Image (cartoon, coloured by chain):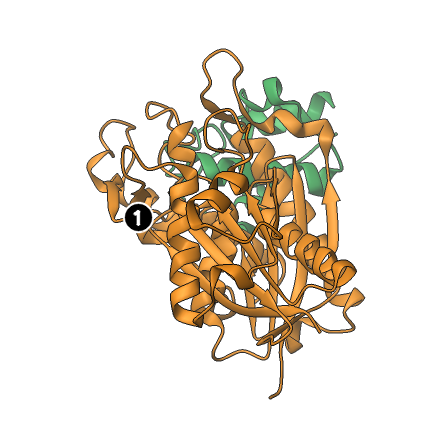
Amino acid sequence: MIGIESIAVYLPEGRVDNTKRLEQFNLTKEFLQTKTGMSRLSRKGEGEETSDMCCTAIQTLMDERELAAEEIECLIVCTQNPDGYGLPHTSAIVHGKLGLSRDCAVFDISLGCSGYVYGLSVIKGFMLSNEFTRGVLVTADPYSKVVDEQDKNTSLLFGDAATATLVSDKPKWDIGKFCFGTDGSHCFAINVNNETRLLEMNGRAVFNFTATVVPRNISRTLEENGLEKADIDCFVLHQGSRYIRDTLAKRMGLEPEKVPFQAGDYGNTVSSSVPIILANEGDVSKHILISGFGVGLSWGSTILTKVDN
Amino acid sequence: MKVTADEIRGIVKEIGSSADMAQLDESMSFSDAGVDSLETFNILLGVEEKFGITIPEDESEELNSISEIMAYLKKV
């Protein structure tokens, strides 16, 4: 069995205080608290690269699990904000910085908010087909590189973070069946403008997509895994905003306590959003449904089940 | 498509809007009634789902009150 053994999180210390920006955007404190939900946004250091964030998360994982660099057989980095222009791939830069084994396979995946779920499927399949027993999936997508700080739609949402998940043959969490989807007809609903190199988001299109597609995907995921809503102890949904969380919980008839929103002090960290919560929620749950959705438009869900030892 | 103000008001209530429903008359703009932009997205989605229509982006920007939605649906 290949599954999740451990998750390490790196949240940079830097913060942007959204409560001081309300006047700039003609917003109320109530809107910030109840709708976007992000009081502060984490920010990487000025000279800190995406690969540096990856290394910090991986080093934390290695220290916590007493994992030696040479034991890592594969490394996948999920990012759409790589070092430089993405060539060489960020995972190769990380490989060099950490001195990983020359036998280690490394590559990047270009996905945003759905990236952790897709990444788990990719790393599990890659490890099983190559008989690997220790792999690391990293998420690191610092949107501070592309956010337009004058854009009301986006500049109050995104925070920088990185996570590193040890996927191994000694799992704490078994990974269930996945359900994925894509809607390329709305691929520019979230995009980086080719000329300005700044992030743009069609808020209404993204809201509509999230509110309609994600509940159907979650229902299908439950069915594929032979479970009902009542069997799930915790729904770890991508932390797009507090209002997205509230809307999804309401539309799916879920008790709010089962659908955590924890991003208030650091923001929407894209593909790190789900694993950051997983790292905190792991101790009390038997079945956790995870769902990532966003740029692409792309979505994916699966169910994690605690392994009985 | 003929739609009543109460049907639209029902959608506003159903999405759990923070608007003061007692104050929300047909001609009042959503923003004046305390409905924010995210709730407006949710209201328009509710209208689309209830009446089985898709409201194009450019047309959605003109729908900022119950009466404007009613007038729009009358033309659909």
Tell me the residue that label 1 is attached to: A12
Query: Does A222 sit left or right of A274 as displayed?
Result: right
Q: Is residue A198 left or right of residue A183?
A: left
Q: Is residue B3 left or right of residue A142?
A: right
Which type of secondary structure does the marked residue at label 1 adopt?
A: loop
Residue farthest bottom in this picture: A309
Residue B55 image point, x, y percent:
67, 27
Q: Position of residue A64 (x, y in %)?
A: 40, 70
Kindly give the residue lying farthest to the left in the view shown: A20
Residue drawn at point x = 62 percent, y = 29 percent? B70
Residue at horizontal 22 percent and vertical 30 percent from the top: A23
Relative vertical location of residue A240 with respect to residue A179 in this rendering, above or below = above
Residue type beneath disc 1: Pro
The green chain is B
Residue A206, given in percent of the width and then of the height, sits at 58, 36
Look at the picture and state if A124 lies above or below A229.
Answer: above
Q: Which chain is orange?
A: A
Quadrant for the C terminus of chain A, please: bottom right
Q: Pick the residue in front: A102 or A81.
A: A102
**Which class describes the residues within 10 Å of circle 1: few (<14), some (14-19), or many (20+)?**
some
Residue A229: x %, y % from top left? 67, 71
Residue B22 in sight from this viewpoint: no
